Amino acid sequence: MFSLRPMQAAFKLAARQPFPFVTTARTTALKASSTYQTRYAATTSTDPAEAVSAEQAQAILKEQRLKRPVSPHLSIYQPQLTWYLSSLNRLTGVALSGGTYLFALGYLASPYLGWHLESATLAAAFGALPLAAKLGVKAVVAAPFSFHCWNGIRHLVWDTGKFLDLKGVYATGYTVLGLTALTTVGLVLM
Amino acid sequence: MSAKIVHPRLLLSASRLVSINRPSRIISSLTAHVSTRGLASVATADASPRVAAKPRIKTFEIYRWNPDTPQKKPEMVKYDLDLNQTGPMVLDALIRIKNEIDSTLTFRRSCREGICGSCAMNIDGVNTLACLCRISDESSGATKIYPLPHTYVVKDLIPDLTQFYKQYRSIKPYLQRKDPPTGKEVLQSIADRKKLDGLYECILCACCSTSCPSYWWNSAEYLGPAVLLQSYRWLADSRDQFKEERKQQLENEMSLYRCHTIMNCARTCPKGLNPGLAIAQIKKEMAFSG
């Protein structure tokens, strides 16, 4: 393949414009530069009535960009252990912290609202529940707590750079899920 | 029948004596027996017709949106193809649909061999290259094809990657030296060159960045796995002398630290690279010497 450079230079010397050639402010400025690629076929309309300046072209593009939709993401992306466990980590984290904050605020406000949130009252109320409800409540608190703890350790391990290949991510992921199940059962039955 | 291979030139001149449309059987009075293999063979009358294989119809559901009618919401359109007549990859199917069914279907493509990165799109929920993604069996339901997730759609399956390229430029993806140029090659040991393996092969298809939920929510400020992988490629290059400046550029809340090790990037990379690992290495370098 011959080099384009000598050909370009030759044409510049001849000071000929290839047909059809659209002259805009941009092309005139660019022609002066040595890196300008001369095109021998028009890539835009050559009708002078349709000629558009660089600023106009940008304005048209801006208008078009405002109308563009965003392609779907969460609704169509394949469920994968990677992002499912990551979202679960965030969800359980928010639920656990949020719950803790709510309880703390409630505890502070309880004298003014007439609630009784002391340990003794809570323990008595819990003890009065039927067995199924007791286990249910414990499971609902123990599951997110165990998952978040084990996954947290998984993140700390990742921060050292270990197990960060695809195999490691999946292996540690399933390990965390298994440990969560065991720990939840353990905590519920305690 | 005994056959003697005759020079093609002789064949041609001989066939001018008989009609060129009839299968050529030069009579022995003119020349010796000629091999008919020199000309295209015509199927004989008693040959059994090839049994047409039962068509395997596969449905493709493809995301369509036309910027010429922007008020019309994007929709999923179904196309049916016989897999027996189609190549094995999703790109083959897309090209067939465009050629034979709906020529307004618009998508990017170039090399058809997984090296240019043009045909990156979301197929059955996974970001990959259409030219490397095999069409699943017709029994496994419709194949859904979307553009790369959470990108502005130019038309049908074409995402606007302007911001992606801007982010790539911003990390200065070229060798930067402080020493004045000597006119000689900048040498690098084999061990140092090995450090670039798994980094330089990136084809900038944007599959990983557009698979990252963190990049979905923060594409304006977070650089994304592809750009960060390339950032690490230059940080890890022993010949580059602007390491501190490169690290300084990442010293803020958003550019690097929006990565939460979701690892969708490594899962989806069609070239088998691991941006998540590279980002972890950057974070380690930033922590222990930044």
Image (cartoon, coloured by chain):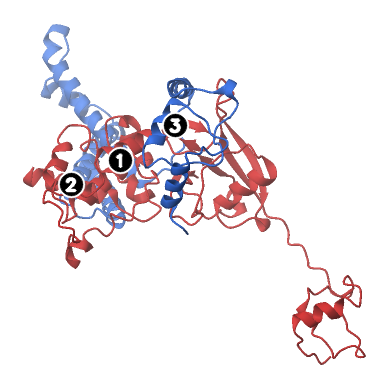
> Can residue B262 be seen?
no
Q: Secondary structure at mark 1?
A: helix
Badge 2: few (under 14), some or many (20 or more) residues near its Cα, within 10 Å?
many
Q: Tell which tag, 3 or 1, sits nearer the viewer.
A: 3
Q: What's the distance in space between the residues labelled 3 and 2, CA to CA?
A: 42 Å
- Report which quarter residue B85 is drawn in: bottom right
Q: Dot 2 corresponds to which residue?
A: B282
- Chain with colour red in the figure: B
Q: What's the distance in space between the residues labelled 1 and 2, CA to CA?
A: 16 Å
Task: Answer whether labels 3 and 1 touch (C-beta < 8 Å).
Answer: no
Name the residue: 55% across, 26% down: B67
- Report which quarter residue A43 is drawn in: top right
Q: Secondary structure at mark 2?
A: helix
Decide which of A100, A34 is in the foreground and name it.
Answer: A34
The numbered mark at residue B181 is none
Q: Are marks 3 and 1 on the same chain?
A: no
Determine the chain carrying the residue at label 2: B
Q: Count numbered badges in the picture.
A: 3
Q: Amino acid at mark 3?
A: Thr
Check the image and report above or below for A59 versus B95: above
Name the residue: 21% across, 62% down: B193
Q: Dot 1 corresponds to which residue?
A: B168
